[in-house]
Image (cartoon, coloured by chain):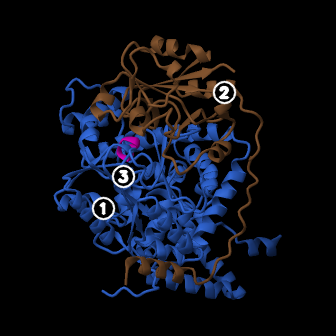
Chain colours: A blue, B brown
Amino acid sequence: MTTFLGMPATAPRGVGHLRGDEPFPRAAHTALADGQLRRNLRHATTTIRAKSGRVIAELPDWQELRSAGSAIKADVLSRLPELLERLEARVTERGGVVHWAADANEANAIVTELVRRTGAERVIKVKSMATQEIALNEALEAAGIQPVETDLAELIVQLGQDRPSHILVPAIHRNRSEIRDIFLRAMPGVDPGLTDDPPALAAAARRYLRETFLSTRVAISGANFGIAETGTLAVVESEGNGRMCLTLPETLITVMGIEKVVPAWTDLEVFLQLLPRASTGERMNPYTTMWTGVTPGDGPQNFHLVLLDNGRSAVLADRVGRQALHCIRCSACLNVCPVYERTGGHAYGSVYPGPIGAVLSPQLTGVEDNASLPFASSLCGACFDACPVKIDIPSILVHLRNQAPHPPAEKAVMRAAAYAMSRPRLYARAQRAAKLARIAGRRGRALPPPLSGWTAARDLPEVPRQTFRDWWAAR
Amino acid sequence: MSSKDVILGRVRAALRDTPTPEPVVRDYRRSFPAADLELLVDRLVDYRATVHRVAADAVAASVSGITGGTVVVPPGLPLGWRPPGALPDDGLAPDRIAAADAVLTAAAVAVAETGTIVLDASPDQGRRIITLLPDVHIVVLRPDQVVASVPEAVARLDPARPLTWISGPSATSDIELNRVEGVHGPRHLHVLLLER
């Protein structure tokens, strides 16, 4: 395969977690039949919506902050090359090493080689969407390196040999008793009398990981923000596992999507107000760590930053779709989405589920590889309202639906409809003919093949007794 | 050709339509009244920190009242604040820090609106590791270090220093999205707010 300079490229096939095994409707069918999953999701999303709503209401300038956040991100995208080079220069000046990874394969190879050079056989990881996206853990394992997820929810997923189902809370599909069962089954040295009390579960994770934090020499993280002006990176977290990974090891490797750069230090005043309130529904998350290169005598003395494209340039090339790159991974759109609340994240097939996943995943992979996702929405618009950086997800969904392949029968019907609708007399005759369906039909609320696909997920509206034209004529 | 050239080439090609976004309008709140210490206390307590209002000369005694165990202190902590038997960090090994009962530091800035305390690794706050491993973190805060809002805190901080923003003790929302205090970081946060 040849890489052409200047051709935006989608994320390669055969690596990473951006493509599902089956289309959304089939995967959703399985998820919808799981009553426990639906109860867990309803409980969790209802809780977070209420919390988030309360703390957002405390800020009189929430809408102004959203607008500023959106404008800063649009500005970033419009001058991305300049900002990335500035970030690279600042990080390098402060003793860090910057690597550029065109796709998942290259990023995995860079990180694996960096770990190998340290001689470490184990790495500790801070929760990171970028490394999930590129399947870094699988690449490290193939190289004989053990990745240990240290975020509680990621640990639950890893110990349960499960897949993440939410951006913020990857184990949102599990309730407390399921989590206890996973810990009892898979956590080495766990107390067999462990209860499902959340503080007890958190304490079990603390005990299990403490020694690992103190004895592992390499950590891998993502980044929430990379500041071009200063070379500062920021990781926003809750548990302290992030601080452990960003402070204790000798070597820190950070994998960051190229869209995560922000121009100036001052811009953090916007995002640090938007992210926690939209994400966990807190005024501020418990811990945020910011570091600039290497600080002698404090924290990791070797710092590597891997800048990842993996399809982002392809997203950027789409004038309508590029705003999906504004995303700060808060997951507010998942928590308000009526579709996500019922199907959960696994049905989307990608590490990016929910409304943002339905617009981001198909763009990162090319629409043909995730063709069902732009349809995994009712277009209700709740995601747009909830988005702290004002991504117009419904408009991108509609835009991507137009790019998705459509079946020939649907195209034929639409062409026929367009023909009839642009000829008034033909249209009137067609309407009268439709009335015959009332007499002839009695098929229920479904269309016959080849149009039955359209009514598989919705009812056909009942044909009225009288057309509007007939009523008008007889009035 | 390097991957950097490939990526930047792709990005430039993707921007061929030369998007010119709207200017960034910063009409969110950027000037604030003086910080409300009562609000700070309220926010800290809401996120399960314990707040003590103490006189500047009563810090050491207050610390002794919180813990009778070993207290790690950064090298530049004011001598008068140190409780008897304090363990100064002169490059302590992680095991010794982890075995201590508590750590006592100053702070750089605090945000009333969010109940946040920021450490910037100055000599009176020390290396990041010392505030991470002990189970109890005691922070001494001067009233003039408290600002009302996040924008004011960002303006006061120096990004060249390693920064740790702390809002309450370690917590997680990973089990059914309910906040549970106490995972990997210190499970107890005490704030000694000095009197004016």
Q: Work out whether B158 lies above or below A304.
A: above
Q: Quadrant of residue A373?
A: bottom left
The CA distance from mark 1 to mark 3 is 23 Å
Q: Quadrant of residue A383?
A: bottom right
Q: Which residue shows up at 58% across the image and 43% down it? A: A277
Nearer to us in this view, B138 or A440: B138
Of marks 1 and 2, the one in the foreground: 2
Q: Work out whether A243 lies above or below B59.
A: below
Q: Position of residue A333 (x, y in %)?
A: 54, 53
- Answer few, some or many: residues within 10 Å of disc 1's Cα (few below 14, many 20 plus, some between 14 and 19): many
Amino acid at the residue labelled 1: Ala
Label ID, residue B102: none
Question: Which badge, 1 or 3, comes first in the chain's sequence?
Answer: 3
Label ID, residue A135: 1
The CA distance from mark 3 to mark 2 is 53 Å
Circles 3 and 2 on the same chain: no
Q: Is A365 left or right of A182, judged from the image as shown?
A: right
The magenta segment: A242-246
Amino acid at the residue labelled 3: Ala
Q: Which residue shows up at 56% across the image and 73% down it? A: A82
Nearer to us in this view, A238 or A460: A238
- The residue tagged 2 is B143
Callout 1 secondary element: loop
Q: Is residue B49 magenta?
A: no
Q: How many marks?
A: 3
- Answer few, some or many: residues within 10 Å of disc 2's Cα (few below 14, many 20 plus, some between 14 and 19): some
- The residue tagged 3 is A31
